Amino acid sequence: MLRSSLFTVTLALGLASSPGFERTGFAQTVPQLLSTVSGTTQYREAAISPDGRYVAWTLTLRNKDNTTSRNSEIYLLDLSRLGAVAQKLSAWKTPHAEHSLAWSPDSKQIAFLSDFEKEGQLELYVQPVSGSGAAPRRITNLTGFLQTPRWSPDGAKIAMLFTENAPRAAGPLEPSTKDAGVVEEHIYEQRLTVVNPRSGEAKPITPADTYVYEYDWAPDSDLVAYTASQGNGDNNWWIARLYTVAASTGEVHQVHKPDLQIANPRWSPDGREIAFISGIMSDEGSVGGDIFSVPAATSGAAPHNLTPDRKSSPSWLRWLPSGKILFTETINGGAAIASLDPPSRTTETLWKGDESIKAGDDSVSTSSDGKTIAAVRSSWTLAPEVWAGPLNEWTQTSHAITHANDALKPLWGQTKSVRWRSDDFDVQGWLMYPVNYDESKKYPMVVSVHGGPAAAKRPSWPANNFDLSLLSSQGYFVLFPNPRGSYGAGETFTKSNVKDFGQGDLRDILLGVDEVVRTLPIDPARLGIAGWSYGGYMTMWAVTQTHRFRAAVAGAGIANWQSYYGENLIDQWMIPYFGASVYDNPAVYSRSSPISFIRNVNTPTLIAVGDSDAECPAPQSYEFWHALKTRGVKTQLVVYPNEGHAIRKPEHVQDLLERTIAWFNTNLTAKAAGK
């Protein structure tokens, strides 16, 4: 009864009247900000044809109330025709989900997934490009979760990942299934499945007890390289190995058992090598490390590190016909595209920008020769649009091929890259200025810590999630640090928080605060801190280690690493970071647990979490909230029903943003600071 009455989420419709919520003197109200962000047209993916002639993209639709819909549409543009207008790919009249674009090798057909015939059940469809406007042809008739279709090089087969009878979409970000009765682990294995596009016959080719994450066709159109593990797919990505399987016989060959995480396997043009990215990674889908290659036919061969000591974090790759490797990377808080010559290990940066690029499952989509590239690009000043064209001409605005967001203007202040020294590291971050910045005034500042920790804050147009860029419009500086453990400065930097959570990374953050407070008119008595996931943990940790922050918002945080180990559903990620399980070395977990130092806290702290979060379970937030409440510290706990690690329901997203802004507006006023 206590939980249902106290923690049921009440939408913050009355928050506008809360003390300090609407700050005077600023042009944008919170509803205006949320309207701008939610009104941004979103592109889910972009895919260029192998011959470089066509670009297809998926546009997310909107509901009548302007919220983001689960439905989407695919558009196609012929780049070879001057003045050509994008056309809707299919002739379906009713909205539905359609995405996961895959071009045939001859650029004449495009495959995709859609739930046109049964809502919620994706099936594989194929449509000729020349028949744009005609009804696509359904290929499969399956029950379960489908993703990542990809044609074989000879065009005779389409592979995809299929989880039969899956009760939900794959991935630890999704809401976990609630337990009842006898608790058992139900394992649904995602298998590599090959489909005949003519007959529709679908045949799984990987073992039934193995969960497949990523794959790539070999040039011979029979062998497939893939990463996989046995057991729970959400949990075991961190211990996946590299395999090959023959599509014709199902014969499996283990190629490599990595020491750390592995991602993005790709065949060389001659079929002799498989390249991949390996390094310490904290989240499936958040990729960074070094580029390695290993002989495809030899089991147990030592891989070759092709980018040793590189001061960046490669995140995606593909081989080019020339034998070079095209790759994207996070570097100094931004993005870059580069080429690598494997024999000499020399690299060349082809493009670099302070922005984010994404083409769906890949960072970019390229033509077969690698000369023409498509991606969705965005930054704090560039609203998301699809760009396509020769890479060396990417800076030209003519290569933006969509313009749905042209009229949008930033409602937040300018942003600058900042750097500072911490121990032996050069640390980078982004500092966003208040709207209508006046150097003669003093401003409050909030530190926004990214998730991960193996991730990075890169410039991007604010999304409808826990994005604190919106605080800029309310008169705040916002510091987005990329402390040790982040991507962008090489593997040594990313690994440097191993067995050191909350120690060196907090020093990095506090020294960054010192640097900007020293050089800009920021009021040191009005500092706040916030974050989600790892950022939520760092927020909980920071308020137990320092009293510099006068307000905090901890989203999906971790209060107690010891209890967390037994509560979360993805404990495999913790071994590389802590060196052992909590049962074998509890001291290393206790050393970094905020709850161990809870008596030090006096910072007003708002806590938020989804009730079905598998990554950072709700009991962690309850534990921290209970401790603060017992200690008499100002606090509030908000639990969002039927939400996983990512808060997605529009009403919950709005409520979270409004509560966050209200919390800082109330607790970081001059009066609250004792002035």
Image (cartoon, rainbow, N blue to C red):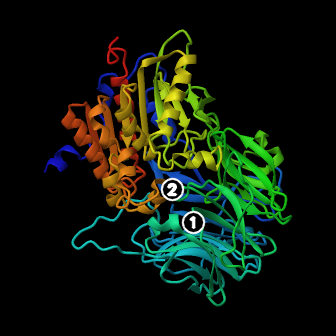
Q: Amino acid at mark 2?
A: Asp
Q: Height in image: 405 above or below 51? A: above
Image quadrant of residue 271? bottom right
Q: Height in image: 303 above or below 475? A: below
Image quadrant of residue 48? bottom right
Q: Position of residue 565 (x, y in %)?
A: 35, 57
Viewer-nearest of labels 2 and 1?
2
On the question of residue 47 being in view, the answer is no
Residue beneath the point at 36% across and 51% down:
587
Residue beneath the point at 48% across and 43% down:
464
Residue under label 2, please give it: 283
Residue under label 1, please give it: 92
Q: Height in image: 558 above or below 365? A: above
What number of labels is visible? 2
Q: Residue furthest bottom?
A: 249
SS for tag 2? Answer: loop
SS for tag 1? Answer: loop
- Real-space Cα distance between discs 2 and 1? 37 Å
Q: Nearer the viewer, residue 85 or 149?
A: 149
Q: Amino acid at mark 1?
A: Trp
Q: Position of residue 97 (x, y in %)?
A: 52, 63
Residue beneath the point at 69% across and 55% down:
364
Q: Height in image: 527 above or below 378? A: above
Q: Nearer the viewer, residue 420 or 360?
A: 420
Q: Earlier in the sequence, mark 2 or mark 1?
A: 1
Q: Is residue 150 left or right of residue 341?
A: left
Q: Is residue 337 left or right of residue 587?
A: right
On the question of residue 147 being in view, the answer is yes
